[in-house]
Image: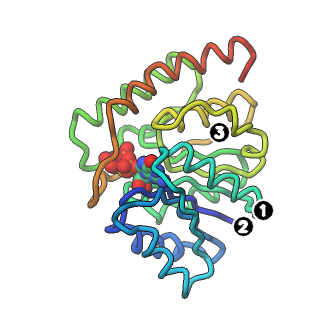
Amino acid sequence: MQVLVIIPTYNEIENIEQIISAVLQQNEEIEVLIVDDSSPDGTAQVVQELQKDEKRVHLIIRKEKKGLGRAYITGFKFALDMGYEYIFEMDADFSHDPADINKLLSAAQDCDLVIGSRYVKGINVINWPLSRLILSWGASFYVQMITRMRVKDPTGGFKCFHRRVLEAIHFDEILSDGYSFQVEMNYRTWCKGFKITEIPIIFTDRRVGQSKMSKRIIREAIYMVWKLRFMHIQGKI
Ligand SMILES: Nc1nc2c(ncn2[C@@H]2O[C@H](COP(=O)(O)OP(=O)(O)OP(=O)(O)O)[C@@H](O)[C@H]2O)c(=O)[nH]1
Ligand SMILES: [Mg+2]
């Protein structure tokens, strides 16, 4: 069993060392891929130092900041080329608890995509301002209404794909870059008839470092959901 945890980073120098070691500790078979967009704070240089003693750490540096979605696609291509079987998405900021990795991995044994879900059993979010919670929960509701996809946390970013899903998705056709990237990946997975399981996780707001949330990303998400729905009706997805 080969497992790759992909962590996109932009200015995560305060988190990077700790998150990598916490992830690697979970399971000997886990490897990590950091996809860094040339963070000005030197995140990638810290990773390069760690690589000297740890063979399970991989790094791809992209020249410019091109968004989360593109960073993940770069990571997915690496994962497929290198033959990993289980491919995780995870944030660097400890919003996702590395201790949940094995839980997601065991759920992945009998489905195609596991989503670590904040909303599968009530609301499991710690330290978020109410406005952010309403935005996220509202977005989940909005996505479910428009797409009819039965996923309670469609925007979450802690998940595990079996490689067969990524092999079936044409990365060049992916439209989204920001938040809606998560929705689009789930929707494409769902439309192809893959089995999706959600398991409850507790999501904690970032402890340190800067948020990359922006109005542009939210606007993209609002119209993208409609676009995806229409593309499905037209048989394009
Ligand atoms: N490579 C790359 N990584 C990114 C980019 N934008 C965000 N990230 C990383 O993606 C992950 C999620 O981004 P966050 O900034 O935590 O987004 P968020 O969780 O919605 O917002 P906050 O936690 O409030 O900051 C983090 O590991 C970021 O460093 C980007 O443009 N390129
Ligand atoms: Mg975050």
> Is residue 188 among what the camera can see?
yes
The amino acid on which the numbered mark 2 sits, given as a three-letter code, is Gln
Percent x, y for residue 118? 42, 42
Label 3, residues with CA under 10 Å away: few <14, some 14-19, many ≥20? some
Q: Is residue 22 above or below residue 156?
A: below
Q: Is the CB atom of the residue marked by disc 2 within 8 angstroms of ligand 1's nearest atom?
A: no
Residue behind mark 1:
83
Q: Quadrant of residue 4?
A: bottom right
Out of 71 and 115, give the one closest to the viewer.
71
Mark 2 to mark 1: distance in Å? 8 Å
x, y percent for residue 91: 45, 55
Residue 196's label in the rendered image is 3
**Residue 97 falls in which quadrant of the image?**
bottom left
Mark 2, residue position: 2
Whether tag 2 and tag 1 are in contact, CB under 8 A, the answer is yes
Going 45% across and 49% down the picture, which residue do you hit? 65
Residue 194, horizontal then vertical, whole percent: 73, 36
First along the sequence among labels 3 and 2:
2
Look at the image and tell me whether residue 201 can be seen: no
Task: Identify the element where label 2 is drawn.
Answer: loop
Give the answer, above or below, for where 50 lies relative to 232: below
From the viewer's perspective, tell me whether residue 22 is left or right of residue 213: right
Q: Earlier in the sequence, mark 3 or mark 1?
A: 1
- Residue 18 coordinates in the image, percent (x, y): 39, 73
Residue drawn 34% across the image and 65% down it:
41
Of the numbered discs 2 and 1, the one sitting upstream in the chain is 2
